Amino acid sequence: MLSEKIYTLRRKSGLSQEQLAEIIGVSRQAISKWEGGLSVPESEKLIAISEYFNVTLDDLLKEDAGCIQKTEQKTVNGQSSKRHKGMLLGILTCVGGITGLVIWGLISILSPPMSSQISESSTIYIDGNGIFLVLCMIAVICGASLILKVKK
């Protein structure tokens, strides 16, 4: 049934009735009526729903629920893959920054002359130690922001 399909698509996307209503350009009560089977969306609203959820009008209107399940799986898997790649990139960036900080800390503790030699060889006016530490911190912050962005 159309009402069940709209409900299923909305829930699987993690949207509230109010959020979907905003996207489609209707009231929350209209979404509630559609999902409850009390009314049917107008044709332009059906088109907007099908475009937003990346399903065909046939999938929405036909009684065969199998079509919509297949389309949902494709959409969910595509989004999952993008999230997974973003999360992996964020984790790798954080780990790289933290690794750099740990290595620099170990060099500074275990071999102070090497640390000062690196600092003296810097062609930039700012101390070489400071530049490396700042770059590592930027990597950690960028990685963390990527992870947080993906989790939203």
Image: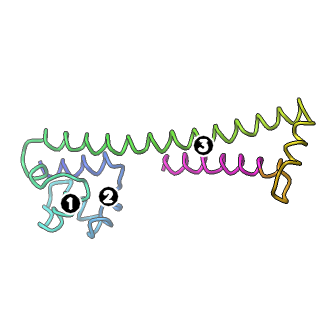
Helix, strand or loop for disc 2: helix
13 left or right, relative to 138:
left
Q: Which residue is mark 3?
A: 93
**Residue at the image position 12 percent from the left and 49 percent from the top:** 59
Q: How many marks?
A: 3
116 left or right, relative to 134:
right
In terms of depth relative to the viewer, which is nearer, 56 or 113?
A: 113
Q: Which mark is residue 33?
A: 1
Q: Which residue is mark 2?
A: 17
In terms of depth relative to the viewer, which is nearer, 48 or 18?
A: 48
Q: Disc 2 residue type?
A: Gln
**Residue at the image position 25 percent from the left and 42 percent from the top:** 74
Nearest to the eye among marks 2 and 1: give it.
2
Q: Magenta residues?
A: 132-152
Dominant secondary structure, magenta: helix
Helix, strand or loop for disc 1: helix
- Tell me which label, 2 or 1, sits earlier in the chain: 2
Q: Disc 3 residue type?
A: Thr
Is 22 covered by the magenta stretch?
no
Q: Which mark is residue 84?
A: none
Report the residue that reaches farthest toward the top: 110
- Tell me which label, 2 or 3, sits earlier in the chain: 2
- C-alpha gap between disc 2 and disc 1: 10 Å
- Residue 7: percent from the left, percent from the top? 24, 50
**Residue at the image position 52 percent from the left and 42 percent from the top:** 89
**Residue at the image position 65 percent from the left and 50 percent from the top:** 141
Q: Quadrant of residue 39?
A: bottom left
Is the Cβ of the residue at disc 1 closer than 8 Å to that at disc 3? no
- Residue 20: percent from the left, percent from the top? 31, 60
35 left or right, relative to 134:
left
